[in-house]
Amino acid sequence: MKNNLRVERAIMNITQAELAEKVSVSRQTINAIESNKYVPSTVLALKIAAVFTKKVEDIFILEEGD
Amino acid sequence: MKPKLLLSHKFKKAGWFIAIPATILMILAMYFDWEFSFLQYNSTAQHYNFDGEVLFFGISSHNFTTEVLSIILITGLLLLAFSQEKYEDERISKIRLESLMWAVLINTLLIMFSMIVFYGGYFLTVMIYNLCTPLIIFILRFNIVMYLDKRKMQRELAL
């Protein structure tokens, strides 16, 4: 699964720490999601999408082989 | 998602305070014949010994140092293993579960290895260690992963 979290974050101009606080996870978790090392749960994905007022599909994209 | 079965973060510190001294005292008790004299129990009552079997109520003279220390040590290890991180989230839960799988696997492999290498009394000693090794392996693995995670993050921030 790919994601464009880093891009969305840049558009909204918030740091990893700020996003982490908004969705109440650790900064490491946001970092791990951005570097494709961790796939968030549905709840967390929905929460992140809500922060950017976008649909989950706009931020998280399925890849071939998923 | 609220983590179930986990204690609050402050219990982790308590865990270290209990587990480390208990480990040191346990080593002293097991290998240097050290014991707390106040845990010595001598019964004056008449006892019946069935074929040398010694049950709790049949004990006439015993020093309870190792028993008490074992319980204290395991309590400390449980606190360490079952307390939340400062920022507990779903990824940490995943690391926790992975570490648990890891600990069970390594521990079982070590026992299988010991079955081949150690016999009799030595194997009994292995079994005694086995009372705490799953927890110890879990705590070590989990904390190493958390430490490396934190260090990696700090390094990235420094760039």
Image: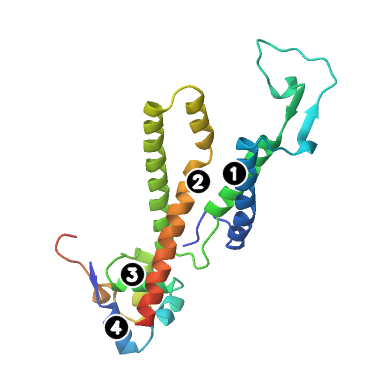
Q: Residue furthest left?
A: A64
In the rendered structure, which disc, 1 or 2, sits on the residue that comes first in sequence?
Answer: 1
In the rendered image of this protein, does residue A33 appear above or below residue B132?
below
Residue type at mark 1: give it: Ile
**Residue in the image at 44% along x and 23% along y:** B119
- Label 1 to label 2: alpha-carbon separation: 8 Å
- Label 2 to label 4: alpha-carbon separation: 42 Å
Location of the C terminus of chain B (image quadrant)? bottom left
Same chain shared by disc 2 and disc 3: no
* Residue corresponding to mark 4: A8
Front of the two marks 2 and 3: 2
* Residue corresponding to mark 1: B74
Q: Residues within 10 Å of mark 3 (few under 14, many from 20)?
A: some
**Residue in the image at 76% along x and 24% along y:** B61
The residue nearer to you, when weighing B89 against B78, is: B78
**Dot 3: chain letter:** A
